[in-house]
Amino acid sequence: MSISDKELQDAFKRSQQVQKQNDAMTQKANARIRASVLAHNKAKENETERVFAAMASHIRAYFSSSTLRFTAGAFAIIAMFGVYHIGTIQNSHSLGPQTAAHRVDIVHYHGFEGEDKLLASKTGNDYQARFNAYTQQYVESKLVAKAVTLEPATLQAQDGYWLLVNCSDQKVVVSENLIASLNINGRIEGDINIGTHVALAFDAQGRILSIKQSSKPLMC
């Protein structure tokens, strides 16, 4: 059965109408989907804005509260105390033996004969110095003169030799060898470490007879 040209034309027109109807329905469906997506995104944006607004409100309230002011004040005090404490520690280190040395005019060196230059090179020779030279027989002798003076001092440094500072801010340096000999002969008494207060016993010539730990604080 053959189809005429008119029938073919009518069939083509009908197919075009169906296609247009389908396109219109598709566009409507797509429009509804787009509207739903946009509405969903808008709702999410509004929710996010509400969350941020609530957070900002809480933050503003916290920063304006007395609790924060108290916390900030306490933190500032702690920070200032920490800076002061660090500065105090640094000053105590930097103003140790060197600062005390700059306030000292006379350094008393106590050691065996021949140790004068060695002691001076160890502790600095830019001060007026008085040397007390000892002999081994003097330290070992049981017949040394009794002490004629007692002088309080504080052990400031212990680097082999002992560095003591008396009430007049004068240095008393005792050589390593003399310390060892005094200790062997029982002339050093007590547990003496840096910061320990001691009593120095001297004979008439100003030579050390003994070094004893003092239970009393340094009274000058």
Image (cartoon, rainbow, N blue to C red):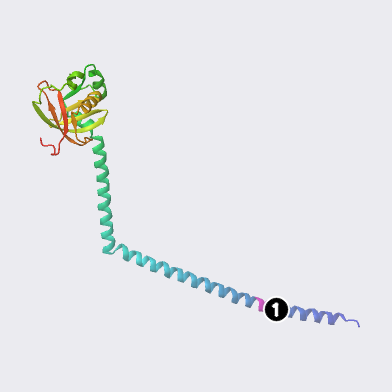
> Could you tell me which secondary element the residue under label 1 belongs to?
helix
Is 72 positioned to the left or the right of 2 in the image?
Answer: left
Density class for disc 1 (Cα within 10 Å; few <14, some 14-19, many ≥20) is few
Q: Quadrant of residue 16?
A: bottom right
Residue 28, above or below 73? below
Residue 92, above or below 77? above
Check the image and name the residue furthest to the top: 114
Q: Nearer the viewer, residue 47 or 157?
A: 157
Is 37 positioned to the left or the right of 51 in the image?
Answer: right
Is 123 positioned to the left or the right of 13 in the image?
Answer: left
Residue depicted at x 32% and y 64%: 62
Residue depicted at x 66% and y 79%: 25
Residue depicted at x 29% and y 61%: 68
Q: Position of residue 164 (x, y in %)?
A: 19, 30
Q: Which residue is mark 1?
A: 22
Q: Position of residue 139 (x, y in %)?
A: 18, 22
Residue 11, above or below 196? below
Q: Position of residue 196 (x, y in %)?
A: 19, 36
Q: Quadrant of residue 173?
A: top left
Q: Which residues are magenta?
A: 21-26
Q: Position of residue 135 (x, y in %)?
A: 19, 18
Check the image and name the residue furthest to the left: 148
Q: Is residue 134 visible?
A: no
Three-letter amino acid code of the residue under disc 1: Asn
Q: Is residue 201 visible?
A: yes
Q: Is residue 109 magenta?
A: no
Q: Nearer the viewer, residue 44 or 94?
A: 94
Q: Assign the C terminus to one quadrant of the image.
A: top left
* Secondary structure mostly taken by the magenta-highlighted segment of the chain: helix
